[in-house]
Amino acid sequence: MPKISVIGAGYWGPNIIRNFYELGCLTAVCDKDEKRLSIIKNKFTGIVTTKDADEAIALADAVVIATHVASHYELTKKALTAGKDVFVEKPFTLKTTDAEELVELAKKKNCIIMVGHILLYQSEVRKLKEYVDTNELGKIYYIYTQRLNLGKVRQTEDVLWSLGPHDISIVLYLLNKTPNKVVAFAGTYLQPGIPDLVFLNLYFADNTIAHIHLSWLDPSKNRTITVVGDKKMATFNDAEANDRIKLYDKGINYESSSKSFSEAFPIRVGTTTIPNVPSKECLKAECEHFISCIQNRTTPITDGINGLNVVKILEAAQKSLELGGAPVSL
């Protein structure tokens, strides 16, 4: 098994640390906070804890970076320069140019980059992908997602950069293509300059549209994805305990030979199917995938290019917000 060091033991880091420890790969944990390191050392025996990122990198075959996004570029570059494979949490970087540089560096060093777009390892999202790839839904007209809740409010990261990578990565994964235009609108209510609400539209060359609604200022928790095709439609509600994914045999068929307008667009209402999709902790699946990619030298599902494409869209959305919702071409 590869030896893995984790840099960052803050909000999300302990979850990653636990998974790699249970998988028998964890060799070191690095954090600037002595109290956090003390907790980690007491909980996970037999590992090295250090405040020195260089030491953590040197001890490992691969490095996981779970620090604040502002440090992703510097730490990823440091690990790649040392010839280590890297799993970096989302968003990959804050700038497209930084992401491009890291992708090129990984290629030069023959290293793997995997970006933590965790929901692409969720079994229900994989099922939606199956529906799209097997043409079960037909031609995809549009996708819309909602990622809403009351909190957690961030001080240094707005709702676009905090929550947006999840849904942007899902849309790109499902459609297997990138948009040519981005439009975004925001609402800023709690803190000056930090949007709490974003409506993001992605436009694709084949007329497909994706709409993403993000908010941490909403009365109810909502984690839904809806995919509408010309044959069938599908939904995934991540906030539900049961019946989380549904396939609808519904649509409107165009019949050019019809004599009247109403006959030309008959509504089809068929059965609703609830597939049996076994649930698995998607973080564990993500960690297992990283280990497999290291061992077999294969490209991760969420590789550096995937991370780069998400950052490009985030940057374009940020520019659209600054322009008051003007379209930004990619």
Image (spheres, rainbow, N blue to C red):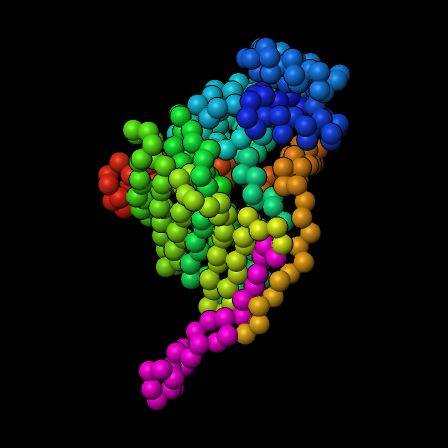
Q: Left or right? Give the position of 273 relative to 27.
A: left
249 or 73: nearer the viewer: 249
From this view, report whether residue 52 is shown above or below residue 24.
above
Please identify the residue farthest to the front as the structure is shown. 219
From this view, report whether residue 146 is shown above or below residue 101.
below
Q: Left or right? Give the position of 73 relative to 183.
A: right
The image quarter containing residue 184 is top left
Indicate the position of residue 16 as horizontal and vertical percent values. 63, 29
Specify whether residue 252 is painted magenta.
Answer: yes
The residue at the point 26 percent across, 44 percent down is 325
The residue at the point 49 percent across, 41 percent down is 166
Indicate the position of residue 239 as horizontal and vertical percent values. 55, 48
The residue at the point 60 percent across, 16 percent down is 36
Quadrant location of the C terminus in the rendered image: top left
| Residue 127 visible in the shown view | no
190 or 327: nearer the viewer: 190
Specify whether residue 57 is painted magenta.
Answer: no
Indicate the position of residue 236 as horizontal and vertical percent values. 54, 54
Indicate the position of residue 63 as horizontal and vertical percent values. 61, 23
40 or 321: nearer the viewer: 40
| Residue 5 visible in the shown view | yes
The residue at the point 40 percent across, 25 percent down is 156
Quadrant location of the N terminus in the rendered image: top right
Q: Which residues are magenta?
A: 243-269
Please identify the residue farthest to the bottom as the structure is shown. 259
30 or 292: nearer the viewer: 30
Q: How many numbered tags mark residues here? A: 0
From this view, report whether residue 317 is shown above or below residue 155.
below
The image quarter containing residue 143 is bottom left
